[in-house]
């Protein structure tokens, strides 16, 4: 195994741990707030919107700062902030204190994902970037799904403080692994023997830019759906009389489907720069999201997650791939990618919370409003595509 492979494996290890730890904490924070402080769906949506806004405002700048400060300094700062935030959060007894700790943890997380996205494609040639991005996606999606699946069981077996202490231990471990990675010798820049950039199937700069814009629009809307769903998951669990453990089992299916989609998209590049794949995925996202939250059937909840997972998988993969493909300022572009995620994490829950505030008599008001917002995103996607075709 050469030094490039060793460094990449260590990067993927840090990435997988980061996904497990952040999912365990942030996904089950809403269950914690409901159980300990009696938070309703509206209150949890408001918290989710706040954390999303923090992530959106910080990620872009964090990616740019990492480009200047150095990747490893940014990673150490991020893991240190997250560890400190969870240590403090584990000792607090007030809802306000827990929300402040979550905001601090969100800020720390902004220094990790853009850098990890940049590290996996650093010094790689354009022909190797798709493979690196594919492995990156599969790694975080696998540990994400496992953390989501097991989180409820950990809460029931170990108590709610496990969502603080387990991630805290992981962040400290990641800090040590980052120090190890920093000391490893850097590989030489790979020579590009590929003809990818001259391939007739590879788009020109204008078309590539358009697809980057399409994906940067689609991905926030995907996270509008994801973060809204996560924030109201305690309410969904209550509707079907599910404990946190069985809610984790039943509602994590889409995460495993997304993982399977990532594997398929990694192995088959035929979807690259094909609009029909992106627009079909977006359409499936709208329909499956509405079905999960509105239709009062556990069977529909399970089946709709199959479509939701595939749609989320292709939209996210598109955003990261088009951001990283032959890009020089990788952590800055990764920061834009993550900021777009933060924007979605803010707008979805914010719209849901406002809808429940003004239409509190309808328990599905938030779901209807966010579904309408997703339809607006679908219209925007088609508009950008048509405008781009007219220019070309």
Image (tube, rainbow, N blue to C red):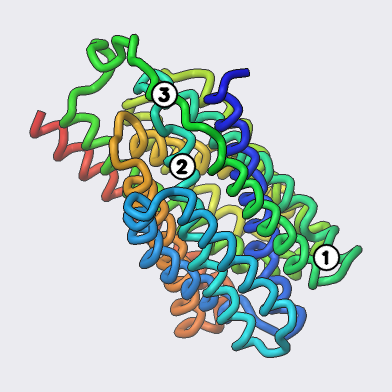
Q: Find residue 264 and name its label.
A: none
Disc 1 to disc 2, C-alpha distance? 30 Å
Disc 2 crowd, CA 10 A, few/some/many (<14, 14-19, 20+) = many
Disc 3 to disc 2, C-alpha distance? 19 Å
Q: Give whichever of discs 1 and 2 has the lower sequence position.
A: 2
Q: Is residue 277 left or right of residue 263?
A: left
Tell me residue 117's x, y (percent): 46, 42
Tell me residue 220's x, y (percent): 40, 54
Residue 202, compared with residue 300, is above or below; it is: above
Tell me residue 357's x, y (percent): 49, 84
Residue 21, compared with residue 257, is above or below; it is: below
Q: Give whichever of discs 3 and 2 has the lower sequence position.
A: 2
Report the residue marked by disc 2: 117
Disc 3 crowd, CA 10 A, few/some/many (<14, 14-19, 20+) = few
Disc 1 to disc 3, C-alpha distance? 46 Å
Label 2: element kind? helix
Q: Find residue 155 and name its label.
A: 1
Report the residue marked by disc 3: 188
């Amino acid at each position: 195994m050469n030094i490039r492979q060793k460094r990449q494996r260590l990067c993927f290890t840090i990435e997988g741990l980061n996904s497990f730890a952040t999912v365990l904490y942030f996904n089950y924070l809403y269950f914690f707030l409901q159980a300990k402080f009696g938070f309703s769906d509206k209150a949890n949506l408001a918290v989710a919107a706040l954390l999303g806004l923090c992530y959106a405002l910080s990620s872009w700048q964090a990616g740019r700062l990492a480009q200047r400060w150095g990747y490893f300094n940014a990673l150490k700062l991020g893991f240190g902030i997250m560890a400190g935030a969870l240590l403090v959060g584990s000792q607090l007894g007030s809802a306000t204190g827990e929300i402040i700790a979550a905001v601090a943890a969100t800020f720390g997380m902004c220094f990790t994902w853009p850098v990890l996205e940049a590290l996996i494609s650093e010094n790689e040639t354009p022909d190797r970037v798709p493979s690196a991005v594919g492995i990156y996606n599969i790694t975080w999606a696998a540990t994400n799904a496992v953390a989501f699946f097991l989180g409820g069981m950990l809460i029931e077996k170990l108590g709610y403080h496990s969502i603080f202490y387990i991630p805290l231990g992981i962040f400290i471990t990641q800090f040590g692994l980052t120090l190890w990675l920093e000391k490893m010798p850097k590989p030489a820049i790979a020579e590009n023997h590929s003809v990818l950039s001259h391939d007739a199937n590879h788009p020109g700069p204008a078309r590539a830019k358009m697809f980057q814009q399409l994906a940067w629009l689609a991905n926030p809307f995907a996270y509008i759906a994801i973060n809204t769903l996560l924030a109201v998951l305690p309410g969904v669990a209550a509707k079907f009389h599910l404990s946190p453990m069985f809610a984790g089992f039943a509602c994590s299916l889409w995460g495993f489907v997304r993982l399977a989609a990532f594997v398929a998209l990694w192995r088959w590049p035929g979807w690259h720069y094909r609009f029909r794949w992106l627009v079909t995925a977006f359409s499936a996202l709208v329909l499956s999201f509405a079905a999960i939250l509105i239709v009062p059937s556990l069977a529909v909840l399970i089946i709709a997650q199959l479509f939701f997972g595939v749609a989320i998988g292709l939209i996210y993969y598109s955003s990261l791939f088009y951001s990283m493909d032959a890009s020089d300022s990788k952590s800055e572009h990764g920061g834009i990618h993550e900021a777009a995620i933060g924007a979605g994490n803010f707008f979805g829950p914010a719209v849901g919370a406002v809808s429940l505030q003004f239409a509190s008599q309808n328990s599905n008001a938030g779901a209807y409003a966010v579904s309408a917002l997703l339809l607006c995103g679908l219209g925007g996607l088609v508009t950008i595509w048509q405008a781009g075709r007219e220019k070309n």
